[in-house]
Image: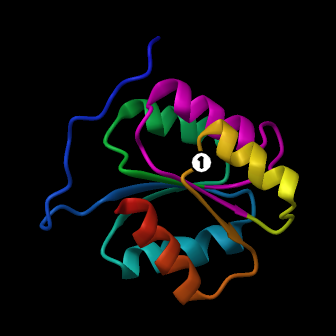
Amino acid sequence: MAPRVRTHVLLPADRPRVLCVDDEAITLRLVTRLLEGMGMDVAPTTSPIDALRIFDEGGVDLVVTDVRMPGMDGLAFVHAVRARDLEVPVVVATGYATLETAIRALREGASGMIIKPFTGEEFVNEIRTALD
């Protein structure tokens, strides 16, 4: 399957749909609330495999993913998203930030990275930057 190139442009009235994957339920709830507070529709999941299934259904404008997850790590997940879509922004969130992780995330196609723990303001700013 060749990666698709997006032709949809978000209009101000659109509610961006965000796919959010994090194996920690409490973090997933926090991020979901922050995104909903920004006026976004959120598809949250604790499973990268389920996240890919949701992504394949279409209509995702942004992806937020954790790095360390069982089954498939976040960087492999970013790679899988990029194989499907070259342009959707992907923000990687991690509590284990190293220079190596940051370089790998960028090589896999991440649009941005945020270090856990983060403030709500830091998260909102990273999301806005990714969507611009």
Q: Which segment did they paint magenta? A: 65-93
How far across and how far down the image is residue 67, in percent? 76, 53
Q: Quadrant of residue 80?
A: top right
The amino acid sitting under disc 1 is: Ala
Q: Is residue 98 above or below residue 4?
A: below
| Residue bearing the label numbered 1 | 110
The reply to whether residue 58 is in sight is yes
Residue at coordinates 44% horizontally, 32% vertically from top-left? 86
| In the image, residue 87 lies in the stretch drawn in magenta | yes
Q: Looking at the image, is 5 positioned above or below residue 131?
A: above
Residue at the spot 76% in from the left edge and 43% down from the top edge: 104
Residue 74: x and y, percent? 72, 46
User: Horizontal and vertical percent for residue 33?
Assistant: 48, 78
Can residue 68 be seen here? The reply is no
Q: Residue at x 20, y 41 (%)?
A: 8
Q: Nearer the viewer, residue 104 or 22?
A: 104
